[in-house]
């Protein structure tokens, strides 16, 4: 009883100490978490080429995918065929975790922007895998919290800021540093149309904004 309480206290202190501080969590640039380096047997690894689909929208997946290396984008496709990029994710993100926990189909597709290395975790055993030890539980909880905060921040960016402001914030986030994680610079990996979709602006307007930004500098 005492050991369990002590472990819970340490988990809470650790979570509060290096957890989800909204002011330093980026909206557009993905975060690479340390937990992508957890020891897992190589037989669970899977290589996914750029443009390959990791998860399908409106489908349940047999696996949760822990991104170990590479960059993926979250894409929602409406009934009329229009697409919205909901964000970018990198090492340490658990693709399909919410779907596995809630028993619901995926709300969006997950597509590789670069070549990726992932770990497959059977969805039916994800809860058991997550609660195997306190450290692993902390890692998954932290990933889910970061995902929630990033979704909220990108929604706030699109709803509250102009296209020019969103582009400027994206450029600033490329250089963001934090002792708890590494912010990945997605700019070299994104095509013009992908960046426009991420910033919720037309490719033509994005081209004008970038030209204006370069002229002002």
Image (cartoon, grey):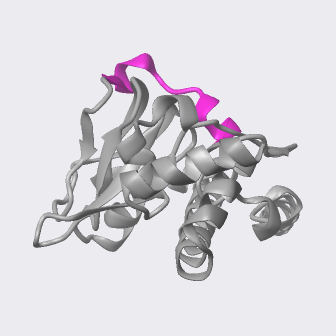
Q: Is residue 45 above or below residue 108?
A: above
Q: Which residues are magenta?
A: 32-48
| Residue 122 image point, x, y percent | 31, 45
Name which quarter of the figure residue 18 lies in: bottom right
Which of 112 and 213 lies nearest the eye of the viewer?
213
Which of 174 and 136 lies nearest the eye of the viewer?
174
Q: Is residue 196 left or right of residue 155?
A: left
- Residue plotted at (13% across, 64% down): 81
Q: Residue furthest bottom?
A: 160
Q: Residue furthest front?
A: 215
Any part of residue 129 in sight: no
Does the segment drawn in magenta span residue 111? no
| Residue 46 image point, x, y percent | 33, 24
Q: Is residue 93 above or below residue 165?
A: above
Name which quarter of the figure residue 1 lies in: bottom right
- Residue plotted at (79% across, 45% down): 176
Q: Is residue 217 left or right of residue 187?
A: right
- Residue plotted at (43% across, 18% down): 42
Any part of residue 112 in sight: yes
Location of the C terminus (image quadrant): top right
Which of 60 and 204 lies nearest the eye of the viewer?
204
Which of 40 and 80 lies nearest the eye of the viewer?
80
| Residue 162 image point, x, y percent | 59, 73
- Residue plotted at (89% across, 60% down): 17
């Amino acid at each position: 009883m005492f050991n369990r309480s002590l472990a819970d206290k340490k988990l809470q202190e650790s979570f509060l100490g290096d957890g989800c501080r909204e002011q330093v969590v980026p909206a557009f640039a993905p975060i690479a978490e340390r937990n992508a380096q957890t020891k897992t047997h190589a037989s669970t690894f899977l290589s996914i080429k750029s443009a390959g689909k990791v998860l399908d929208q409106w489908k349940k997946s047999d696996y949760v995918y822990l991104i170990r290396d590479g960059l993926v984008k979250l894409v929602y496709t409406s009934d009329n065929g229009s697409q919205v990029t909901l964000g970018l994710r990198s090492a340490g993100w658990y693709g399909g975790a919410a779907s596995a926990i809630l028993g619901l189909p995926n709300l969006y597709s997950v597509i590789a922007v670069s070549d990726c290395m992932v770990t497959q975790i059977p969805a039916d055993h994800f809860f058991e895998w997550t609660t195997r030890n306190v450290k692993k539980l902390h890692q998954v909880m932290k990933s889910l919290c970061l995902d929630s905060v990033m979704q909220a921040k990108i929604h706030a960016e699109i709803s509250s800021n102009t296209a020019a402001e969103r582009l400027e914030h994206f450029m600033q986030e490329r250089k963001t540093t934090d002792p708890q994680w590494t912010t990945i610079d997605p700019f070299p990996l994104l095509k013009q149309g992908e960046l426009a979709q991420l910033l919720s602006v037309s490719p033509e307007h994005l081209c004008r904004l970038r030209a204006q930004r370069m002229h002002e500098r």
